[in-house]
Amino acid sequence: MCGRYYIDEDTIREMEKLVRQIDKKLLEDHSRDVFPSQSAPVVTGRAGELCGEELVWGFPGFEKSRVIFNARQETALEKKTFRDSLLLRRCVIPAKNFYEWNKKKEKYTFTRPDGRMLFLAGIYDQYGEEERFVILTTEANDSMSLIHHRMPLILEERQIQDWIFSRQKAEAILGQTPVLLDKSTEYEQQTLDLQ
């Protein structure tokens, strides 16, 4: 679930409004789909301030060639791989949209109805020389459930500080149902582009 998402210049501009410090590499044009194992912009908390950084998507998997790119919010505190990160190293992943495929392998794009940025809840950890993140998922809401049974845990912009800096408020956020999203298929997008 949530194995690919999209970022563009607007994503970075929105992120820049939130943070005190930003890695200058992030200010270059980053319009692209983001896949697990790639570097991507995230918002972290360093010394009490929000920072924009580039981390690698996915914790190392148990098999060398694989990565773990999602964590279930319901069980993350119970699993050794995620527990300390969820307690101590929470982050936010900005995205313009994300994709999901149904059982027929049809691709759907999910966006906010108001056109605003998606802020996905995540956690991160240090592995060797790299800091890596995963996206937390939750049970799918009504806008997603016919396509897939899981979806990213989506934060509202006003929740970003609480998610990153307050363990107590972050635990409360874990149980929330994400905002309803708009969905479209590749075919619908191509039709709209032609009009």
Image (cartoon, grey):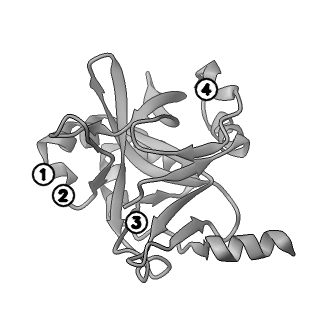
Q: Amino acid at mark 4?
A: Arg
Label 3 to label 4, Cα distance in Å?
Answer: 29 Å
Does dot 4 land on a helix, a strand or a loop?
loop
**Residue 129, position in %: x, y?**
32, 16
Residue at (21, 43) in percent of width and height: 82
Q: Which residue is mark 1?
A: 78
What residue sits right under mark 2 in the picture? 75
Query: Which secondary structure lies at badge 3?
Result: strand
**Circle nearer the viewer, 2 or 3:** 3
In the displayed structure, 152 sits above or below 45; it is below
Closer to the chain start, of discs 1 and 4, is: 4
Three-letter amino acid code of the residue under disc 1: Glu
Of labels 3 and 1, the one closer to you: 3
In the image, what residue type sits under mark 2? Thr
Q: Which residue is mark 4?
A: 20
Between 78 and 159, the one nearer to me in the picture: 78
Whole-Å distance between the Cαs marked 4 and 2? 32 Å
At label 3, which amino acid type do we have?
Met
